[in-house]
C-alpha cells in the first residue's frame, strides 16, 4: 500500500470518529456557500458541509477578542466534514437535490435556472442543517472578455513561506494584516473599463477554508468582485497533496468550455507556475487568450515562495502565437507596460 493510501485511510478513519463524537455532543451540520458562476444555460453551485458546535454560532465574530478570533481561525483547519449527506439547492424557482462528496463538498450544475445576468443569492440546505445562502454570478451572454486572476503574490503580498500561507490566511482573520500588491486594483480597473460585462474569476491553489477571509480582502481593497475557484488540501489517490498546477489547468479548461465565445486576460505571478500554466494555455488556445500579465516577485519573495531567488518558469515568446504579455513588479508597472502594449 502506498504511503498516500495510508494517510488517506487514517484521515477517513479520523474524520469518521470525530463525526460520531460531534453528533453525540449535539453538533449540527452547517453549510458554507462559496461563490458560484454560470451562463444563461446552467449554473455551478459550490459549497461545503461541516459539523458545527451550535454554541459557537451564538457568538458574533466582530464582538470577539483578537485571541478568540485567532482561535476561531485555527479551527477552520481542524474541520469535521460530513460526507454523503443529502443536500437541497434552490436556484431561482428551481430546486434540485444532491449530496456531499467524501470531503463534504457540494459541486453541482443546475440546468435551466431562468436567472438574469448578474449576481444572485441562492439557497442551500443540508439534511439537519439550517438553510444557508451562496452567491452565483450569471455571465451576460454578450460578454466577450473575461479576467482570470491568481491571488497569493498576485493581488496579495504574503511575505510568508508557502508552507505557512494557508494557515496564515485562515488563522489571521483581520484583513488589514494582509497587504495588497500596490496598484493591482487600478490595473484591473483599466483592463475592464471598456468591458463592463466582463466577469472576473479568482483562480488559486489556496484552500477553500480561506474563502471568507479572501472575500473580505477583495472587498476591502476595491478589487473587482468575482467567483473564487480554490482547492481542497490533503491526500489524493495519487499523492499526499493535490496538484496545484493540475487544479489551475482543469479550472481554466472548465471556463474555456463554459464560455466558448469569450477571450481571457490571464493575470498571475512568477513565484510558482503561473507563467508555465498560462504559456501552455496560449500555445493550446491562442485564439482564446487576449493577453497575459505576470507580476514579478522580488528576490526575497521568491525565496519565500520556493526557496530560490529566481522564478521557476517564464513566459516570453508565447510559442510565437502573438498573444501580448506584460511583466511588472506591481500593478502600477503592469499598467505602464499595458498602456504601451494593450491587449486585444
Image (cartoon, helix red, strand yellow):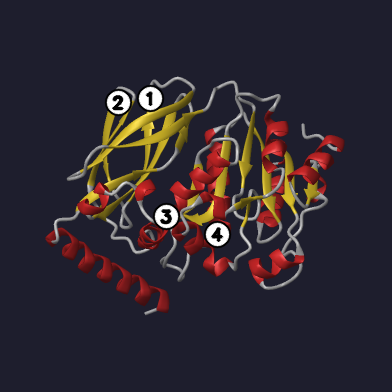
Residue at figure coordinates x 41%, y 34% from the top left: 135
Q: Which residue is mark 1?
A: 112
What label sits on residue 94 in the rendered view? 2
Tell me if mark 3 has few (under 14), some (14-19) or many (20+) residues whose alpha carbon lies within 10 angstroms of its own: many
Q: Position of residue 236 (x, y in %)?
A: 42, 65
Asked whether the residues under the numbered discs 2 and 3 touch, taking CB atoms below 8 Å apart as contact, a structural biologist would say: no
Residue 259 position (above or below residue 322): above
Q: Position of residue 173 (x, y in %)?
A: 46, 54
Q: Which residue is mark 3?
A: 209
Quadrant of residue 334 within the rendered picture: top right
Label 4: state its secondary structure: helix
Asked whether the residues under the numbered discs 1 and 4 touch, taking CB atoms below 8 Å apart as contact, a structural biologist would say: no
Q: Which residue is mark 4?
A: 244
Tell me the distance, in whole angstroms, between the alpha carbons under discs 1 and 3: 30 Å
Tell me if mark 1 has few (under 14), some (14-19) or many (20+) residues whose alpha carbon lies within 10 angstroms of its own: some
Residue at figure coordinates x 77%, y 52% from the top left: 329
Earlier-in-chain disc, 1 versus 4: 1
Earlier-in-chain disc, 2 versus 3: 2
174 left or right of 282 in image: left
171 left or right of 124 in image: right
Q: Nearer the viewer, mark 2 or mark 3?
A: 3
Q: In the rendered image, which quarter contains the N terminus?
A: bottom left
Earlier-in-chain disc, 1 versus 3: 1
Amino acid at each position: 500500500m502506498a504511503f498516500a493510501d495510508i494517510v488517506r485511510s487514517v484521515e477517513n478513519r479520523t474524520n469518521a470518529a470525530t463525526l460520531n463524537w460531534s453528533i453525540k455532543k449535539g453538533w449540527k451540520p452547517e453549510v458554507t456557500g462559496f461563490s458560484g458562476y454560470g451562463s444563461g444555460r446552467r449554473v455551478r453551485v459550490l459549497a461545503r458541509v461541516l459539523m458545527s458546535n451550535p454554541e459557537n454560532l451564538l457568538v458574533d465574530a466582530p464582538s470577539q477578542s483578537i485571541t478568540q478570533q485567532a482561535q476561531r481561525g485555527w479551527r477552520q483547519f481542524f474541520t469535521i466534514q460530513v460526507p454523503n449527506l443529502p443536500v437541497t439547492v434552490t436556484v431561482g424557482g428551481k430546486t434540485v437535490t444532491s449530496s456531499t462528496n467524501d470531503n463534504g463538498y457540494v459541486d453541482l450544475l443546475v440546468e435551466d435556472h431562468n436567472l438574469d445576468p448578474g449576481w444572485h443569492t441562492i439557497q442551500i440546505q443540508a439534511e439537519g442543517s439550517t438553510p444557508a445562502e451562496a452567491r452565483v454570478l450569471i455571465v451576460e451572454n454578450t460578454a466577450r472578455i473575461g479576467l482570470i486572476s491568481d491571488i497569493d503574490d498576485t493581488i496579495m503580498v504574503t511575505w510568508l513561506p508557502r508552507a505557512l500561507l494557508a494557515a496564515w490566511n485562515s488563522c489571521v482573520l483581520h484583513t488589514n494584516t494582509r497587504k495588497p500588491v500596490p496598484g493591482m486594483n487600478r490595473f484591473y480597473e483599466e483592463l475592464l473599463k471598456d468591458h463592463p460585462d466582463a466577469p472576473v474569476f479568482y483562480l488559486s491553489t489556496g484552500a477553500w477554508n480561506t474563502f471568507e477571509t479572501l472575500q473580505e480582502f477583495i472587498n476591502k481593497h476595491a478589487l473587482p468582485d468575482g467567483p473564487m475557484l480554490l482547492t481542497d488540501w490533503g491526500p489524493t489517490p495519487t499523492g499526499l497533496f493535490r496538484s496545484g498546477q493540475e487544479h489551475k489547468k482543469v479550472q481554466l479548461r472548465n471556463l474555456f468550455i463554459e464560455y466558448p465565445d469569450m477571450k481571457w486576460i490571464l493575470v498571475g505571478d512568477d513565484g510558482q507556475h503561473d507563467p508555465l500554466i498560462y504559456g501552455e494555455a496560449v500555445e493550446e488556445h491562442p485564439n482564446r487568450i487576449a493577453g497575459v500579465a505576470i507580476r514579478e516577485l522580488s528576490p526575497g519573495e521568491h525565496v519565500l515562495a520556493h526557496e530560490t531567488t529566481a522564478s521557476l518558469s517564464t513566459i516570453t515568446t508565447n510559442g510565437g502565437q502573438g498573444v501580448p504579455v506584460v511583466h511588472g513588479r506591481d500593478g502600477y508597472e503592469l499598467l505602464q507596460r499595458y498602456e504601451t502594449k494593450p491587449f486585444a
